[in-house]
Amino acid sequence: MNYRKLGKTDIKVSEIGMGCEGFLDKSDEFTNEMFDLAFRHGVNCMDLYSPNPDMQRRVGNAIRPHRSEFVLQAHLCAVWENEQYRATRDLHEVKTAFETMLKNLGTDYVDIGMIHYVDSLETWNAVVNNGILDYAKDLKLQGKIRAIGMSSHNPVVALEAIKTGAVEVLMFSVNPCYDLLPASEDCEDLWSEKSYEKPLFNLDPMREKLYDECQRLGVGITVMKAFGGGDLLSEEYSPAGKAMTAAQCIHYALTRPAVASIMSGARSLEDLQTSIDYEYASDEERDYAAVFASFPQISWEGHCMYCGHCAPCPKGIDIASVTKFLNLAKDEIPETVREHYAALKAHGGDCVKCGACEKRCPFGVRIRENMQRAEVVFGY
């Protein structure tokens, strides 16, 4: 298992994490089997959005022997009422639900306190004005959470939140279909058939800006909906009109800027094992470029996907990394980006413009122009 640092925090998470959807209405035995499989393969993190008290109890029992090394991302603003989940922005309810969750889990802290489901600016303003953000800050000072997070499907709202500097971890929906769609306050637009009736072209600019800003600001991203609720794995249901494999979906998400971990919504041991198998997959099995180029309704023409098909460069340039750092330096060059660029063995200025890379690129990227721009931006 590979581990990644979660933004600027001191938290390291496994590339493959666990969602909690598959634990609803399940037994202690099922829960323990799932966690045993996860622990055997080095999975060290989970997203726990549900306030279901029985699930919290079962998860708490399963992770207790591993608590000090296990990263628990648990949500504020979710309450359990009349045997159902409900989102809330009422500060008293938020406080009560958080303390109840700690008791149910049998722990005195969670690693990431995730402010739940903020998909509109109105909701974000309520989080700020109702004292919820201040409460999260207080919890961090008390040691009851290690980092403040927020979950969202809307890049406009997420950008507003991360620019405050208070949000250290963002849970966001990342996959090659959702990434094409414009911001919306209704997350169901992401999987609505109407959203994909017309051909779509390239990454939505606001989503691209969000990922780049998270990288620049040191905000770590944990990923939800990497498989689009399973739709991307089915040719019948995929908005792209063609099925991808789990390894391809995971690799796409993990190659986006700032992404640290994929929270796999596994509903069975087989589902979880499929996600874990990514860590043992070959480069060919992870490669998503060929299937992307064949999507009938979607085009990534001219957009670098960091897929690595341009390699090898005769001068040893890591073209995908140079391009990624170039994209992160659009308005100004953060010091960390400058340092990462400097650490590369070869740079944009080393390009001899042979064009071999462009012949291999499935997306028609003008790589030689990018290398020339990188030389201008970084000075070598």
Image: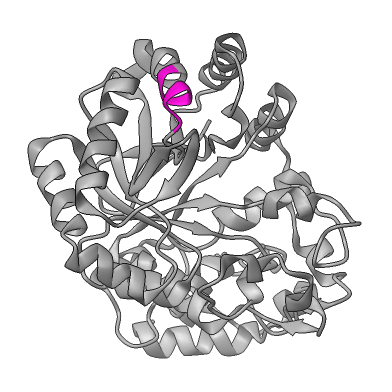
In the picture, measured across the screen, residue 305 lies left or right of residue 284, that is left
- Quarter assignment of residue 184: bottom right
- Along the viewing direction, whichever of 288 and 312 lies nearer the viewer: 288
User: Where residue 291 sits in the image (x, y, percent)?
Assistant: 83, 62
> Total number of numbered labels?
0
Quadrant hosting residue 242: bottom right
Q: Position of residue 103 (x, y in %)?
A: 27, 22
**Residue ID at (39%, 69%):** 158
Above or below, 359 relative to 29: below
Along the viewing direction, whichever of 363 and 145 lies nearer the viewer: 145
Q: Quadrant of the C terminus?
A: bottom left
* Residue 227: % across, % down: 69, 51
Q: Where does the magenta region start and end?
A: 52-57
178 in relation to 200, above or below: above
**Image position of 204 (left or right of 374):** right
Q: Residue lying at the far front in this picture: please name it.
A: 82
Q: Is residue 91 above or below residue 298?
A: above
Q: Left of 238 or right of it: where is 315?
A: left
The residue positioned 43% from the left and 85% from the top of the image is 375
Left or right: 320 in relation to 166: right
* Up-down relation of residue 251 to residue 241 (above or below): above
Give the main secondary structure of the magenta stretch: helix
Name the residue at 73% across, 69% down.
Answer: 192
Quarter of the figure with residue 313 = bottom right
Q: Residue at x 44, y 41 (%)?
A: 49
Q: How is the image coloured?
A: one colour
Q: Position of residue 257 (x, y in %)?
A: 47, 63
Residue 140 seen anywhere in this rendered image of the structure: yes
Residue 147 belongs to magenta span: no
Q: Is residue 317 visible?
A: no
